[in-house]
Image: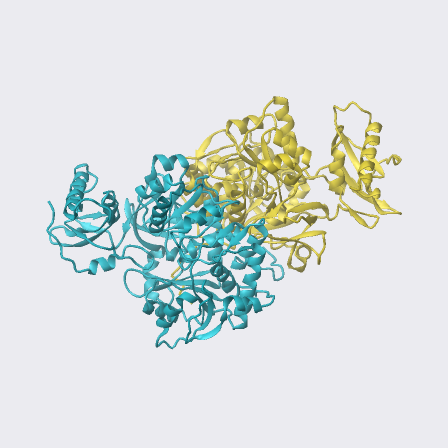
Chain colours: A cyan, B yellow
Amino acid sequence: MNNQPSSVRCGLTIGSILASGVRAARGTEIVTSDGRRMGYQALRERISKLGKALADMGVATGTRVAVLDRDTHRYLEAYFAVPMLGATLMTANIRLSPSQLRYTLEHSESSVVIAAAEFLPLLEQALEGSTLRLRLIVCPDESQHFPSTSMEYAGDYEALLEAAGEFDFPQVDEEAVATHFYTTGTTGLPKGVSYTHRQLVEHTLAVGLALASADDYQSLRVGDVYLPLTPMFHVHAWGMPYIATLLGLKQVYPGRFDAKTLPGLINREGVTYSHCVPTILQMLLDEARLQGVTFSGWKVMVGGSAMVPTLASRALESGIQVFAGYGMSETCPVVCFARADATLAVQAPAELCRVGCPVPLVDLRLWGEGVEQGELVARAPWLTRAYVKNEQGTCQLWEGDYLHTGDVARIDADGAVRIVDRLKDVIKSGGEWISSLDLERMLREHQAVEEAAVIGVPDEKWGECPRAFIKLDGMRTVAEDEVVRELTVMLNEQVRNGVIPKFAVPRSFVIVEEIPKTSVGKIDKKRLRTMVVAVPKPHA
Amino acid sequence: MNNQPSSVRCGLTIGSILASGVRAARGTEIVTSDGRRMGYQALRERISKLGKALADMGVATGTRVAVLDRDTHRYLEAYFAVPMLGATLMTANIRLSPSQLRYTLEHSESSVVIAAAEFLPLLEQALEGSTLRLRLIVCPDESQHFPSTSMEYAGDYEALLEAAGEFDFPQVDEEAVATHFYTTGTTGLPKGVSYTHRQLVEHTLAVGLALASADDYQSLRVGDVYLPLTPMFHVHAWGMPYIATLLGLKQVYPGRFDAKTLPGLINREGVTYSHCVPTILQMLLDEARLQGVTFSGWKVMVGGSAMVPTLASRALESGIQVFAGYGMSETCPVVCFARADATLAVQAPAELCRVGCPVPLVDLRLWGEGVEQGELVARAPWLTRAYVKNEQGTCQLWEGDYLHTGDVARIDADGAVRIVDRLKDVIKSGGEWISSLDLERMLREHQAVEEAAVIGVPDEKWGECPRAFIKLDGMRTVAEDEVVRELTVMLNEQVRNGVIPKFAVPRSFVIVEEIPKTSVGKIDKKRLRTMVVAVPKPHA
C-alpha cells in the first residue's frame, strides 16, 4: 500500500538522541568531572572529535571499545561517540577482580580501551599473560600522572580530541549493537548482555515519558538538573544520561563518588535528579547529617537492591524525594518504579519502597497460572535478547518466551509490584516461602543493627532454616548477646502477631565485622553460604 | 554477536498502547459521548468485542475499515480494534463533498464502514452509482433513528458488541499499516497518507515525552483529563487519544461539538487537556463570554492554522493555558510546539503563537543553504513515507530526502520555528516575499474585522499585489467604507514604522459575507483566487 520513497531512514539511533538534545538545550550546561562547564554544542563537538580520533584508529562497525572510568563527562562522550561509529561500547566493571575483568575483556573481544589513569594498574594486572591486544587511550587524572604501560599506547584522551578535526558520523543501522557489558551473577562466570541502538532509544523514550508524566514529587522535566550516583558502567547509569541528554537538561558529572564533597556539589549546582543504590543513599545521609546539610527538591530513584522504609523516611526528612525503581542488567534496566506524591511519601513511606508499576510498553507478570506470589517475568522492547555467546543461559533467561528476572514478587491490587526476594535467596521452610528480605528489614529495625543478611541453611525438620548475619552498629551500648536476645524477642513478637510463621525465626545468629558484598554493592549471599562459621547455640 | 532467543517479539504496536493504558489507569474513566462512564477494563473489553465482531465479518490484515463519526468513544474503540486486527483504519472526512468522499472510499478500497446514523444520507449520496461494495455497521444516534440504506447492513454497533464473545487479537507486525486517511490540498484530488503501528507508537512516545516534560503551563501528566476538540478523522485527533490512553488518563468524548454545552462539560468533568484550531477556540471563548463562564487549568494546544496573539491573550484571560503546535496530515501530525510558561504567556503572548521547538527525534530545517527564511522541511521516524498510490506526489513530498511541508518559516535564535506563510500563499511582490498571514493578523487587529484573508493577484508593476477579503463584525457601528479607510491608514502606519514594505498594503479590499473555508476549517485560498469579485477602486 506504501510506495517507499527514496532512501530516507529515520532509525532510532544513539545519534538521534544527541541531535535532539542539542536542539532542546536552552543554554544548559554539562558540568564536567574536572569542574569545567560546556554547552551542548561543545559536547557535540567533543563527541564528534572523539568519533574522529577513534575512526582514525580503525574503530568501525563491530569494534568493541572498552571504557574504565568513573562518572565523568568523558564517559558520557563515549556513550555517544562509540555507538555513533557503529561500534560497540563495552562498559567494563572496575570493581571486578583482575581475572574477571580479563575474562570480560577477552570474551567481548575488545580491541580498544579508554581508561582513566588510575585504572591502568588494574588493567595491567588483568591482562597479564593474556593474548588480547588492546590499544589504549588514557584519560588523565587530577595529578596528570601517567603510569607506564605494556599496552599499545594510542594517545592521551584530551590530546587526541585536540588533534581531531571535523567529523561526520556514518549512518548507523538501528539494529547495530550499541552497548555491551557483563553482569556478575551469584554463580558462574560473568554473563554478557547487549543492547541495540533501537532498544536504547525505546528505553529512553518510554522511561523518559513515564518519569516525566509522573507527579511533581518524582517528575523529570525541563529545568531539572541531573547528576548520576550509580557507576556509569552499571547498565549505562540506568539509561538516565541518555534521557537527560535527549531533553537537553543540565548535567553534573561527579567523577569519583566522594561522600564528603557530594552534598556541597549537589546543593551548589542545584541538582534535582539522581539515582543510586540504598548504600550510597545511606552514606550520603550520614555525611549530610555530619555536615548539618539538608537538600531541597532533590528527586532520587533508588534501586539495585531493596530500599527499607526507615531509609526512605530518613531521606524524606533530609529533603530528598525518594522512590524505588526496579530493573536489572538484563532489562536495560528500568521496567517499573514506585508512583508517589508528597502526601503519600509522608503518610506511607513503605509505598515508596514497592518497585511500583510498569513503564509504558512493559508487560510484567508472575510466572505460573493464577499465583499470588511467584517469579517476576517480563516482556518489553528493550530487554536483552540474549546472553552473548551463551546459548544455555539465554534459553534459561527466556524460558517460555518471557525474560525471567530471578526475583520473587507479588503484585498488589493497584498493580504495583512488590519484590519478595531473590528466587535463589528465598528460604523454603516448613512448606512455605520465607522472604529473606522481609527478615532483613525487620532485623535492621533494631537500633544496634547496622546491617543484616539472612540465608537458608539445610534443616532436617523444616527443609531449610533461616540464618542471620548481623553487623552491629559501632556506636551501640549493648552487648552482642543482648542484641541477639532482643532480636529473637522482636521476631517472636512478629510470630505472635501473625506477620511471620514460627519457623521464620532464625535458628542461628552470626555476628560479623562486615557483610560481604558483590562488585555492585549487593549482599553477596553466595559467599555467605560458603562462610564457615562457628554457629552459636540457638536462642530460645 | 546476539543469539536471538526463540520467538519473542515486542514490536511497537497499537495493541501495546492499549495494554499500557490498562496497566496505568488508576480507576480513571472514559466519559462516553452519550454521557455514560467506563473504566479502562471496560474499554479494553469493548475493543476486544469490536475486534471479534469485525473478525467474524472477515476483517483481517489488509482490510480497510472506514469510519464516519463525531468525536465519540466508539471512534476511540475503532482507533484500537481495527489496527489490532492487522487491518487499516480509514478515518473518512465527513466534511468532504459526496464526490470527494466517494473518491476516498474507492481509492482506499474500503470494504467495511462504521458510520454514525446521521451520516448515512451523506454516505448514500457518495456511493450513488459506485461499484464499491461496502458492508455497513451503524452507530445509533440519540434518536435511535436508523435511516434506510442500500448498503449491505452488517448490524448495529452496540448489538454487534453485545453478541460478540471473548477475543484474542492476533500478533500484528509493527510495520503493518494501521491508519490511512486523505488530505485535501488546495489543488487536485485528495491525497492519501498512511501510518504504520510503529510510527504511531513512536509519535505517541516522543510527543508524549515532549509534552510531559514541558513546564507546568503545558505539561501533560498523570491526573490530567483529556477532551479532544479536533475531529477524530483529522490526523487521529493529532495522536492525542493514543497518548492519553497510553498514560491511562481520564478521557472525555464530546460527540458533536456544541459550543453551548462544551464550557459546562469541560468544567463539570474537570477537563485539563485539549487541542483545537483557532476557529473553535474563538467560538468557545465567545460562548463562554456569553455564558459568563471562565476556565481553570485548562491546557490547550492550538494548531491547524496560525493563532494570533490577540486570540492567545483572550484565551489566557479566560483561564486557558494556550500554546501553538504544528504539524500536518503528512507528519502524523505533531513535530513541534511552542514551549511556554505562565510568566512568558502573560508577558509575551506572541511567543505562544510561534510553532516552537521540535519534539525529540524530529529534524526540522529550512530548505536551501544558509537561508534565513525558506520552506520548512522535516525528517522524523513517524512522517508518512508516501502518498498512497501516488508516485509523483510522493517524489515531490520527499524531494531531496526531506519531507516538504509547503510552509515558509523562519527559525529564531532560540531554535523556535515561526511560520511565515503557506508556500503557495506567500505573495511575491516587489522582489520580496510578503506573508499573507502577517497581513491577515494585522487586519484582524481592527475591532470591526471578524475575519480577514489575503491573497496575491497578478500586478504588472510588482509581479503580485495583495488583495484582502474582509468579513466584518456584525455588531460594528462604522460603515464599510470607513473600515476600509481605517485599515489602509493602519497598514500605512506599519509601512512608516518599517514593519512591512510599501507594496504590502493591499491594493484592493473586498467585503464578503463569509470567508470560504476548507473541510478542516482553514481559509480556502484556492476558492478565493477563483472568486470573481467586483473590485472596488484602490484606496489611497
Q: Nearer the viewer, residue A401 or B77?
A: A401
Asked whether the viewer can see residue A524, the reply is yes
Q: Quadrant of the C terminus of chain A?
A: top left
Q: Is residue B372 left or right of residue B54?
A: right
Residue A390 position, x and y percent, is 35, 66
The relative height of residue B57 versus residue A512 in the rendered view (above or below) is above
Q: Is residue B428 left or right of residue B132?
A: right
Q: Quadrant of the N terminus of chain A?
A: bottom right
Among the 4 quarters of the image, the one containing residue B483: top right
Q: Residue at x 30, y 52 (%)?
A: A407
Residue B71 position, x and y percent, is 56, 36
Asked whether the viewer can see residue B107, the reply is no
The relative height of residue A180 versus residue B378 in the rendered view (above or below) is below
The relative height of residue B463 versus residue B290 in the rendered view (above or below) is below
Q: Nearer the viewer, residue A139 or B283?
A: A139
The relative height of residue B222 versus residue B430 in the rendered view (above or below) is above
Among the 4 quarters of the image, the one containing residue B8: bottom left
Residue B360 position, x and y percent, is 55, 51
Numbered disc total: 0
Residue B317 position, x and y percent, is 62, 29
Q: Residue at x 61, y 22 (%)?
A: B291
Q: Is residue A277 left or right of residue B170?
A: left
